[in-house]
Every structure is written in C-alpha cells, then in structure tokens.
Image: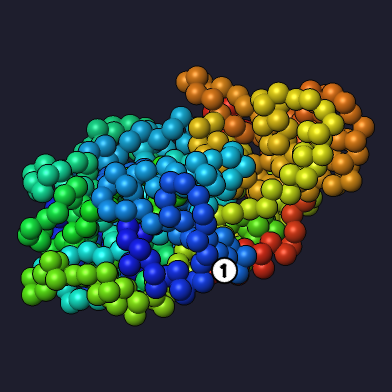
C-alpha cells in the first residue's frame, strides 16, 4: 500500500508490475516466486488508505477460503526532526493524532510485532490527518500509517502488517521542497532492503499457512451432494481431522464416493476419529527441527 | 536470541532490568507504559510470533500468587501457583498457553521481591497446617528454561530459605540446572520434570531437551540430593502408546533411585474449550487436535476438551500398572480430565 505514484514507481520497476485496468484505485500486479503481488496507489491521507484497503479486500480477499496469511506492507515517506534524508525506518509503534493536537490521540498506540528480521532502524510513527508544521518529539510523522495498521490488522495477523518509511524531510530539509522526482530518488536506493524485508515477511507468512489437503475431495462432493453451509463447515473440519490423524486417504475417498447422505458421512468420519489413534512418525524430529538442549 | 525488548517505564531502572539489558546489548529497546499495550494487543498470531518472540519486561502489580486449580496437587496441603513469566522457550503443541495468550512474546515480571513478599505472607497463614503449603512455579512458563537470563531459581531458592515450612515446586523440561547444582540441596524444593516418550517429544515438544537429557538432569539432581518429581502430563494418545509409555516408565525408574522420588503424577490432555478452538485454528493441520477428543463439563461448569473417557482410562490404566511395578502408589497422583484428583493409594 503506497500513497503516491512517485513513491511506488521504484517498486513497480523492481517487481516489473503491470497496471491492472479497472475502477477504484490504481492497482499494479505481478508475481514473484509464485507469490502474487498487488500494489495499490492509495492516495494521501487516512481516508484514502482506509478506502484502498477495503477495496482491495473486497476485490481479491473476501472469500472464506482465502488465507489470512497475507503480507500487508506500507511503503512511503515520512518526516522526522533529525534523521537523515533517505534513511529507511521500520515502524515499531504507531499512533494517530487528530487535528495536529498531540493531546488529541485518536487511539492508543499500536505496537507492531517485530518478528521478521530487519537490520535497519526502528521508529515510532505519529499519523496526522492533516499536514503537520512541526515534527513530534522523537517520532516520524506521516498521514496514512495509523489507518493502514488499524484496517490491515482487521484482515490478517499483525505480524504480517508492516510499514517501512523513508525519511523525506527534517529540520534542515523542508517538506515544502519535495517534488515527485525527489521522492522517487529517496525511495529508489532503498528498494533492495525493502524487498528483502518483504521476502522475509513472505517466508514468515508461509510458516502460518497449511495445505488444505481435503479440499479437492470436498469440492467433488459439493458438486454431487447438496449440503448446508453448516454441514460444509463440519465436513471440512472432519475431513481435515481424518487426514491429520493419518487415516487412510483411500478409506476417506471411498466413504465419500459411497454416500449421498452428508449427515451419515460426518457421523461415520466422527466415529472413525474417535477410535483411530494418530500414527506418529519418528521423522517428527526432522520435520520440526532438532531438539535443543537448554 | 532476543532481538527486541519492550520495557515498562516503571521498571527501567530496576536492577534486574538493567542486568538483562546488559545481557542483550544488541537488542532494540522500546519503552512502553504498560505491558498490556504489547502483550494484549489485538490481531497477534501466536504461531507466527513464536518464530521470533520478543522479551517484555514488566511489573506484576497484583494477583501474583493464586490458588492452584483443584486438581493440582503433589503432596502438599494448600496449593498455590505463581508465574514470574508468561510464555515459554519451548513450543509444545499441546500447551494451553497457545490458546490462552494472543502473544508468544516472553513476558517477564522483574519484581521478584513482591512475589516473594506475597509468598511469605501466604506461607505464614498456613504455618499451623498439617501439611506444608505448596507453591507451584512453571504453570505459565518453564521454571528453568531461561534461568541464565532470569535468575529466577537462584533468587527464589533464597526466598524459600526463609520459609522452610513451605514447598516450592519448579516444573520444567529444561536442563538448566547449574544454579541448583551449585548449592546444597534444599528440603523444601522439588524439581519436577514433565516427561513424554521420545516419539511424542520429537513430534510435539519442539525445542525442548530430549527425553534422555531430561532424565540425565534428573539423575544429576537426585545425586546432588535434590527432591525430584516426575510428571507424565499430558499423556498423549497415539498408536503404540502402550509400548511407548511402558518404555518411558522403565527408562525413568531404571535411571533414578525410586525410593527418593518425591512424587509421580499422571495427567490427561485437557483444555478449556475456548483455548482448544484457538489452538486448532492456529494449527488446523495438527493431529493432536484431531482424534479421540470429546467435550465435557468441568465441576465449575466450564466446557473442556479432553480425550474420551474410555481412551483416557485405558491409557492411565496401562501407565499406572507399569508405575506400580516400581513405585509406592501413595506418592502417585492422577489428574483425570473431569478435574477430580484420584487417590490411588
């Protein structure tokens, strides 16, 4: 999620993203190592950020079967009293401020879980809903961060909702002197470190994902037999459990093929699970990593 | 390795905080007002956070020492538990902490002196009791796993010097026993090890020391004169459990001086239903949440998930019979999932 085209341009070039024609927000799409990338130009300010997140969710990620383990990365520029221009800062804490009044905090601070690696600086971000004339004490300042964290964490784990801000102005270099070309020049040299960070986040996301192995069976069954949503959820859970417990796939497939009665199938699988002890593999150790000796 | 340390402003100058910050000089430090801002923040994912937990240093302001759950007993009179730390170095798939907390960060309460004061006051209340009050540590964390950082055991052994009529139980899977071996054994401290068959440990106790290393630590402690306890808890149902648990019992009792074992407990896999649902959502692919389970109501009316009665009964029967071949049953305690402690003596 990037506020301005001039901030996004270096990332679009790096990932070789293509513009996706449509209504709403400017969207650039691409793929890296089988992972889909959606880059949205949100526009400036919290309302635009809020709208862009809702729009993206509605367009691509609202189906129940969509994984929640998606990476949300906000890249942009921010001001700070004395940090040097072009310095990338990972946001560790964010708070919204109404009408530039530091006493008028819109919500309590959001602390960003810092799970994936980052070798650079960490910083606190203060988001204002209008242009700020002075820099808050010790914090970076922008106009979208708080809305980004607030809404993106509604749709995925906070560990995967992250923001990198590049310093665009400070006490010595006024924001008034910025233009689109300068902003692109500030972002561009940081693209390698930003994309490396994004790779780390994608790796982390994969640690949360899992293969829904029974999906095909369930899809086949759904085409053949009518079932309620509640039955579908129950059956889905039951099929996953049978596979987890190590029940023979052929047995499961046979049970599915032989029935036209979903209730009966659920009962039959439940009974099997009640008496079938899980089969543990001695390979467990290599799957889960060797035991430490602490 | 700790990359990030959140520090409550109130404990910034605490000597224990300073010591820990010295230990992790390269960590990024972030000052916070109250630990809840970080630890209880919404949308955290335990599974992801467990990949690289941060450390939170805070003060525990109240409810530091609590009555232990009804079934928690190992030979004492009044039973209490306390947690100087929330969350654990290890990543055991059956652990209720995954369902209880949103955060996998290590939350360390550095105000040990307040815990000590509360424990001493409670011990005083039970001074005339027939049996000593028992204080369990290691309910919300492993008591010893992070000892080099926390210095918890070293500190609380001194505390229990002052209250010889109270017992401290250190529940652990860790081999960090240097601070214990470095001093004379204490009569009122029990070091209790949670043990599982090797195959179970390999599958569901990620990061924990192997069974062999835990037994080795138990032997060292016993040789040094420490009271040791054995906790077969939770017992995990799997194909071949009869053989695997029998072998485990044989291994343990062959290695230790059986007469000097303080107590043995046996407990089933049991969780509040709410925690179970969170854990299954975090690990939908894991077999441990998939088979042999049923829902029941605890004495207090809370919904619990545990193994079906007949499964648990069969497992306990096999293990209990094996234990009885070696061990005095008056010191064997069985925690059944229905929350009733069975006296097998």
Closer-to-camera residue (A47/B120): A47
How many labels, in total? 1
Q: Is B63 on the left or on the right of B42, as rendered?
A: left
**Residue A159: horizontal and vertical position, in percent?**
42, 55
**Residue A121: horizontal and vertical position, in percent?**
27, 72
Depicted A146 relative to depicted A294: above or below: above
Q: Is A141 on the left or on the right of A40, as rendered?
A: left
Residue drawn 81% across the image and 45% down it: A247
Depicted A39 relative to depicted A213: above or below: below
Closer-to-camera residue (B195/A12): A12
Closer-to-camera residue (B212/A165): A165
- Protein chain holding label 1: A
How many other residues sit within 10 Å of disc 1, few (<14), some (14-19) or many (≥20)? few
Q: Is A161 on the left or on the right of A178, as rendered?
A: right
For disc 1, the marked residue is: A32
Quarter-of-image position of residue A239: top right
Is residue B345 in sight in this rendering? no
Quarter-of-image position of residue A286: bottom right
Quarter-of-image position of residue B210: bottom right
Is residue B245 in sight in this rendering? yes
**Residue B112: horizontal and vertical position, in percent?**
23, 53
**Furthest-bottom residue in this view:** A189
Q: Is B278 on the left or on the right of B196, as rendered?
A: left
Residue drawn 74% across the image and 54% down it: A280
Residue drawn 90% across the image and 36% down it: A257
**Residue A12: horizontal and vertical position, in percent?**
45, 69
Closer-to-camera residue (B333/A203): A203
């Amino acid at each position: 999620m990037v506020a301005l085209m001039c901030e996004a341009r270096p990332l679009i070039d790096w990932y070789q993203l293509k513009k996706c024609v449509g209504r709403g927000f400017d969207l650039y799409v691409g793929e890296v190592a089988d992972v889909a990338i959606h880059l949205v130009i949100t526009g400036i300010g919290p309302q635009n950020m809020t709208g862009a997140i809702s729009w993206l969710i509605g367009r691509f990620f609202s189906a129940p079967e969509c994984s929640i383990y998606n990476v949300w990365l906000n890249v942009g520029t921010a001001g700070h009293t004395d940090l040097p221009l072009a310095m990338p800062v990972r946001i560790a804490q964010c708070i919204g401020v109404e009408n530039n009044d530091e006493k008028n905090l819109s919500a309590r601070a959001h602390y960003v879980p810092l799970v994936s690696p980052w070798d650079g600086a960490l910083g606190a971000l203060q988001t204002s809903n209008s242009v700020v004339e002075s820099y808050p004490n010790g914090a970076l300042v922008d106009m979208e961060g708080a809305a980004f964290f607030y809404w993106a964490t509604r749709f995925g784990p906070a560990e995967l909702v992250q923001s990198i801000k590049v310093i665009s102005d400070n006490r010595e270099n006024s924001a008034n002197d910025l233009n689109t070309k300068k902003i692109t020049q500030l972002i561009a040299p940081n693209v390698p470190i930003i994309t490396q960070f994004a790779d780390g986040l994608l790796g982390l996301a994969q640690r949360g994902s899992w293969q829904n192995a029974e999906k095909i069976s369930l899809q086949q069954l759904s085409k053949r037999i009518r079932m309620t949503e509640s039955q579908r959820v129950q059956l889905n859970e039951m099929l996953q459990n049978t596979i987890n417990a190590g029940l023979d796939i052929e047995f499961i497939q046979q049970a599915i093929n032989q029935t036209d009665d979903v209730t009966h199938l659920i009962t039959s699988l439940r009974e099997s699970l009640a008496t079938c002890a899980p089969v543990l593999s001695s390979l467990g150790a290599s799957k889960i990593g060797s035991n430490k000796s602490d | 390795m700790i990359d990030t340390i959140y520090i409550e402003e109130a404990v910034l100058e605490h000597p224990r905080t300073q010591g820990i910050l010295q230990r992790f000089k390269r960590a990024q430090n972030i000052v916070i007002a109250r630990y809840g801002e970080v630890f209880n923040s919404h949308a955290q994912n335990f599974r992801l956070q467990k990949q690289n937990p941060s450390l939170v240093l805070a003060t525990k302001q109240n409810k530091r020492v609590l009555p232990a759950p009804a079934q928690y007993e190992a030979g004492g009179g009044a039973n209490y538990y306390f947690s100087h730390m929330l969350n654990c170095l290890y990543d055991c798939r059956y652990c209720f902490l995954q369902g209880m907390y949103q955060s996998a960060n290590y939350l360390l309460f550095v105000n040990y002196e307040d815990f000590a004061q509360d424990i001493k006051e409670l011990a005083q209340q039970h001074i005339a009791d027939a049996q000593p009050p028992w204080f369990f540590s290691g309910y919300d964390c492993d008591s010893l796993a992070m000892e080099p950082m926390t210095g918890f055991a070293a500190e609380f052994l001194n505390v229990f010097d002052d209250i010889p009529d109270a017992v401290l139980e250190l529940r652990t899977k860790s081999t960090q026993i240097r601070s214990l071996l470095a001093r004379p054994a204490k009569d009122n401290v029990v070091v209790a090890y949670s043990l599982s068959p090797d195959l179970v440990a390999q599958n569901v106790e990620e990061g924990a020391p192997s069974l062999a290393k835990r037994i080795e630590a138990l032997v060292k402690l016993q040789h040094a004169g420490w009271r040791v306890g054995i906790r077969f808890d939770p017992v995990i149902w799997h194909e071949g459990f009869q053989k695997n648990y029998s072998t485990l019992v044989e291994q343990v009792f062959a290695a230790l001086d059986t007469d000097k074992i303080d107590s043995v407990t046996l407990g089933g896999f049991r969780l509040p239903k709410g925690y179970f649902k969170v854990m299954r959502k975090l690990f939908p692919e894991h077999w441990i949440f998939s088979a042999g389970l049923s829902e029941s109501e605890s004495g207090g009316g809370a919904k619990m998930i545990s193994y079906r009665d007949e499964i648990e009964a069969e497992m306990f029967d096999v293990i209990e019979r094996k234990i009885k071949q070696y061990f005095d049953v008056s010191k064997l305690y069985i925690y059944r999932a229905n929350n009733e402690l069975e006296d097998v003596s």
